[in-house]
Image (cartoon, helix red, strand yellow):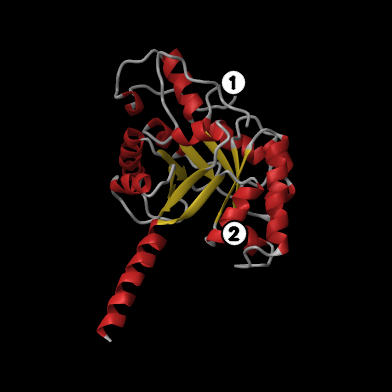
Amino acid sequence: MTATPAAPQGALLPNPAKERLLAGETVLGMNVRVIRSGDIARIAKTTGHDFIFIDMQHSLYTVETIGHIAQVALAIGVTPMVRVRGVDDPDTSVLLDNGVTGIVFPDVNSAAEAKRAVDRCRYPPVGRRSVGGGYPMFDYRPTPLVDAVAALDSAVLTVCMIETREGLENVEAIAAVDGVDVLHVGSNDLLAALGLPGQFGCPRHLAALDRVIAAAKAHGKIAGVGGDRNLARQVEFIRKGMRFVTTNSEIAFMLAEGGRVTSELRKALA
């Protein structure tokens, strides 16, 4: 993985998921769709997740709510990541200024779009992120900008989702863009785009994953995958080389356990 520079000693901002990736490990994330409390970060930590993947693309989150969740996550060592609405989402910078340390960009189809994503996340000379001040990540401590900017820049994790035919065809060029950290396969959308909705683990799905893994490896980036919730296949994907993996959503976890408990109780009552 081509790492962004380490933060200076004067201002450290940890990103546990990024640190594990840099160490060659695999990280697991929980998709967050409905919970509006910072408690979801604590639940993610208790259940063994390295990051939360707050879905702003498909869910009704405000930036203020995400900021509160992110602050809890930062305090307990869980990386707060947000899937924004696209590479030109204007909320990207305000999220990063208020606690979020990773941005997931959906539908990245070309190197040009990947560069626009990087521009939103990274400070010059790599990107075009605007410099603010009074950052909550430093507990609002007065921090020299030279230290704050370097620390914030080193902590951010930039993820480009590969989930269209065009994105898959251009994955090698996307992987070559400086500042991209992770290529993350959105299995649901990619299979739909290939005319194979829901056919997880089919030959074309596996071939697409292999291509993304190869592109990531060739350019020092991380390969990731989500959407396919079958545990056996998730294990195989990790063995293939996927190291940034979303397990399931908090909705699915609640439904699974709630359904199990009521099913057992009704069996007993019957």
Q: Secondary structure at mark 1?
A: loop
Q: Residue at x 35, y 71 (%)?
A: 260
Residue 215 visible, this angle: yes
Mark before the other along the chain sequence, 2 or 1? 1
Q: Residue at x 42, y 28 (%)?
A: 14
130 versus 108 height, above or below: above
Q: Secondary structure at mark 2?
A: helix
Q: Nearer the viewer, residue 172 or 248?
A: 248
Mark 1 lies on residue: 125
Q: Position of residue 45 (x, y in %)?
A: 36, 44
Q: Using a 10 Å C-alpha cutoff, classify the residue at mark 2 as few (fewer than 14 neighbours), some (14 to 19) or many (20 or more).
A: few
Q: Quadrant of residue 2?
A: top right
176 versus 241 height, above or below: above
Mark 2 lies on residue: 233
Location of the C terminus (image quadrant): bottom left
Location of the N terminus (image quadrant): top right
Q: Residue furthest left?
A: 269
270 versus 216 height, above or below: below
